[in-house]
Image (spheres, rainbow, N blue to C red):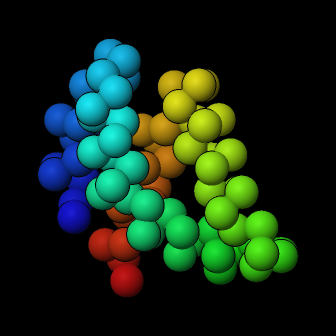
Amino acid sequence: MNEMDIQPWLIRMSQGDEEAFQAVYDLTRDQAFGLIYYLAPSKHDVLDIMSEVYIEYCVSNLLPVIIVFIVSIKNYN
């Protein structure tokens, strides 16, 4: 996955497209989980933190920013 693959989905998601949100989630959940797992102080809270991140960023319309960040990390490795 790279930023170009996800860009059309991010645009649709920003317009309120639920299918696009599902696609973005499916494309990024593994990388997001890995990053959150690495950063989480308590490993048993990872799934809760991940849910909070997606909910918060979706509500605040900042999810595209975090997705680009996650994609960038994935491409860096």
Query: Can you give x and y, in whole percent of width and height, for residue 76 in the image?
Result: 36, 76
- In this rendering, would 40 be left or right of 3? right
Task: Name the residue at the right extreme.
Answer: 41
Give percent across and percent down for residue 73.
43, 69
- Position of the C terminus by quadrant: bottom left
What residue is rendered at 69% in x and 68% in y?
A: 46
Image quarter hosting the N terminus: bottom left
List x then y, in percent, for residue 64.
Answer: 42, 38
Is 34 rendered above or below residue 65? below
Q: Residue at x 83, y 76 (%)?
A: 42
13 w.r.t. 21: above or below: above
Q: Nearer the viewer, residue 33 or 64?
A: 33
Residue 18, position in %: x, y?
A: 34, 27
What's the residue at 30%, 57% (across, down)? 27
Q: Residue furthest bottom?
A: 77
Q: Residue 8 or 49: which is nearer the viewer? A: 49
On screen, 64 above or below 50?
above
Tell which residue pokes out farthest to the top in this image.
15
Q: Quadrant of residue 35?
A: bottom right
Please indicate, yes or no, whether residue 13 appears anywhere in the rendered image.
no
> Is 32 situated above or below 63?
below
User: 1 left or right of 15?
Assistant: left
- Which quadrant holds residue 47? bottom right
